Image (cartoon, rainbow, N blue to C red):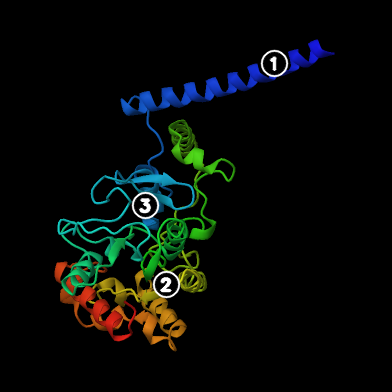
Amino acid sequence: MQLKKRQLIGRSLLFIFSVLFTVFTLEGMARWLTDRQLLSYYQPLHSKIDPATEDWRWTHTFDDSNFTADYQLFWRPINNRFPFDDRGNAQSEEFVSFRTSPEEPKILVYGDSNTQGLSATSWANQLQLLLLSHQIPIEVMNRGVVGYSSYQGVQRLKKDLQTYKPKIVIFSFGWNDVAPSANAPDPFFKPYPRIGGDLFALSRAYGVGVFYSNKFLRSRDVKPPPTNYSSLSTLYQPRMTIDLYVQEFKEMYVLTKQHGAEPLILSRPFNTADEDFSDPQNWRSRVPAYNNALRQLMRDDRAHFVDLEAYFIDKPQFLFDECHFIPEGHRVAAQLLFEHMLEFKLL
């Protein structure tokens, strides 16, 4: 009996070793071959479902050199690779080297590309400069990430609350939330298997498998029917519906309060001079509706809401395209936020 038991244990260990050896060998070979460009792996910038969808999630998840794949966030910054520092904060050329101890309360800033900012500056960086110039030694951590929706912002906030102590949490989303989804809204978007998702997100072998399986399916003409999601057709669905969008802001508000901090919600500024906003068939024309939903949510709470859309609506000179500030726009936005914080004694 003891002999059989030892044999069973031995065979089990041999099986486990064989599986692990095979997995590590495949992963090592995949990385060696893809690093030398002898094999390709899943890079949806080149192979996403339909270029007309404008679903940027695949691009940033798999094919943006500043980001690495993440099971929950889809993509996250690579630390210590410009424009991100060793904690994943967005930096700029005007970055202020000011850092407080981990236990000191901070201003945590979440948003999309307009929050991450330009290589030259960002409104979060300008806010830090204003605070220091007024002898207010609070660190501003710019957690803005290009392409992020409110869902991703809340997910990153949840992770950050395990590490950082916030004094104020600033939330600025509403562009990527409206952008079209090629398959599922963000809370239901699963680019990796549910079981072992974190491992699959890091696996080059998995990426190779996905790339060549998709290539095979395309060669067999197995693909979804072409759809132009830049038009508000009956098949259009945003990355976040208005209800989901508002729900994320509510969760952010509650989480922030639970951690003894003050939430500050911003409407999403944009350039109405852009012709896309005058076209009711373009998804961008729905951005104002999302801002209106925020106004309704915050109508009785002026202290925790700054209406950037209302301020910049007739000032297209502060944006260089449909939704991004020029450097002066970042400075003006920071000044507005700073004055609001002083007025309502949030600092």
Mark in the foreground, 3 or 2 = 2
Q: Is residue 14 left or right of residue 222?
A: right
According to the image, label 2 marks what residue?
261
Q: Is residue 337 left or right of residue 251?
A: left
According to the image, label 3 marks what residue?
51
Image height of 81 relative to 27, above or below: below
According to the image, label 1 marks what residue?
11
Q: Position of residue 31 (x, y in %)?
A: 39, 27
Distance from Cα at disc 1 to Cα at disc 2:
56 Å
Distance from Cα at disc 3 to Cα at disc 2:
41 Å
For the residue marked with disc 2, what is the amino acid? Ala
Q: Quadrant of the N terminus?
A: top right
For the residue marked with disc 1, what is the amino acid? Arg
Mark in the foreground, 1 or 2 = 2
Q: Position of residue 272 (x, y in %)?
A: 26, 77
Q: Give me the residue at 42% from left, 72% from top.
A: 261
- On the question of residue 126 being in view, the answer is yes
Image height of 255 relative to 101, above or below: below
Q: Quadrant of the C terminus?
A: bottom left
Q: Which mark is residue 116?
A: none
Q: Nearer the viewer, residue 232 or 8?
A: 8
For the residue marked with disc 3, what is the amino acid? Pro
Which of the two discs, 1 and 2, labels the residue nearer the N terminus? 1
